[in-house]
Image (cartoon, rainbow, N blue to C red):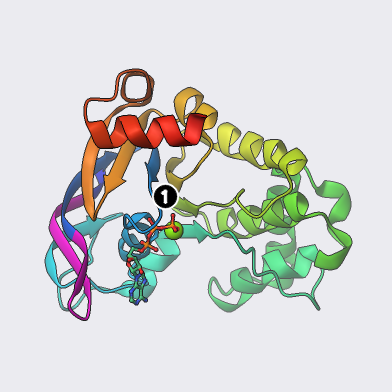
Amino acid sequence: MSLVSLRNVVKRFGAHEVLKGITLSIEEGETVAVIGRSGSGKSTLLRCLNALEAVQEGEMTVAGIAVTSPDADLNRLRARVGMVFQSYNLFPHLTVERNVKLALKLVRKMSDAQAAQVARAMVGKVGLADKLQAYPDELSGGQQQRVAIARSLAMQPSMMLFDEITSALDPELVGEVLRVLEELAREGMTMMLVTHEMNFARNVADRVIFMHDGRIHEDGPSQEILRDPQTPELKAFLAAVLH
Ligand SMILES: Nc1ncnc2c1ncn2[C@@H]1O[C@H](COP(=O)(O)OP(=O)(O)OP(=O)(O)O)[C@@H](O)[C@H]1O
Ligand SMILES: [Mg+2]
């Protein structure tokens, strides 16, 4: 069953058309890497998927919710679609455990004990069981980003969106975050991630989408797309990022 289904989706900021008719299906369990030049619309596409941005035309169903219908329950949508950004936005005055527990208690209405149990499990899953009582500024960037992932996973989303989550990290910290994503992909989480890590896209993603000028310019199995780009635009993009 498709978890994401878009038909002719158009997004404009004023007169500026940023998504120029996106048609796309993503199946349950797929890991999709989104690549493309700066300004091509990658972040906007992700933000539209969980309704952080409204679209102007087209039809969009995500995680069972008809997002473009007037009575769509957007809070329900956002609970089903987790999103992690480049900046991890942890609360600096709260421990790792309390950062992860917060939404579980406020949104999911869990008791403190229930929330603590989920927090321990999720923080353990990203390899930080020994940091539950640490504050964000006591952690490296890679560790903070893993906490942000744990916080999102704790809500038990149907799907995860990741927008360049390793771009602000020191190079030696990128691997530990990518390993968490790789593990999630192996477990069958449906994921869409904007990345500049071409090796990761090739080896971990099932599928690569190349965005160019607000459109999906190429879309296919990651190995094939990256080995044998069909359009001059993707050839030029790959030449620029790989050299
Ligand atoms: N809130 C906004 N208001 C107006 N224009 C916007 C807004 N957000 C994005 N845009 C414009 O939409 C276009 C696509 O932006 P977007 O952030 O989706 O690109 P991107 O592919 O993610 O780029 P990058 O690789 O630099 O992150 C850009 O021209 C950008 O200036
Ligand atoms: Mg972006």
The overriding secondary structure of the stretch rendered in magenta is strand
Q: Nearer the viewer, residue 123 or 32?
A: 32
The quadrant where residue 224 appears = top left
Find numbered disc 1 in the image and state the secondary structure of the residue it sits on: strand
Residue that appears at 26% across and 74% down:
54
Q: Is residue 12 highlighted in magenta?
A: yes
How many residues crowd mark 1 within 10 Å: few (<14), some (14–19), many (20+)? Answer: many
Is 27 drawn above or below residue 15 in the view shown?
above
Query: The magenta stretch spans which residues?
Result: 5-19
Q: Quadrant of ligand 1?
A: bottom left
Of all residues, the one furthest to the bottom in this rendering is: 14
Q: Is residue 72 highlighted in magenta?
A: no
- Residue 35 visible (yes or no): yes
Q: Is residue 11 left or right of residue 53?
A: left
Residue that appears at 36% across and 18% down:
227
Residue 91: % across, % down: 72, 75
Residue that appears at 27% across and 41% down:
26
Disc 1 marks which amino acid? Met
Residue that appears at 23% across and 55% down:
214
Residue 18: % across, % down: 24, 64
Q: Is residue 199 left or right of residue 6?
A: right
- Residue 31 visible (yes or no): no
Can you identify the residue that label 1 sits on? 159
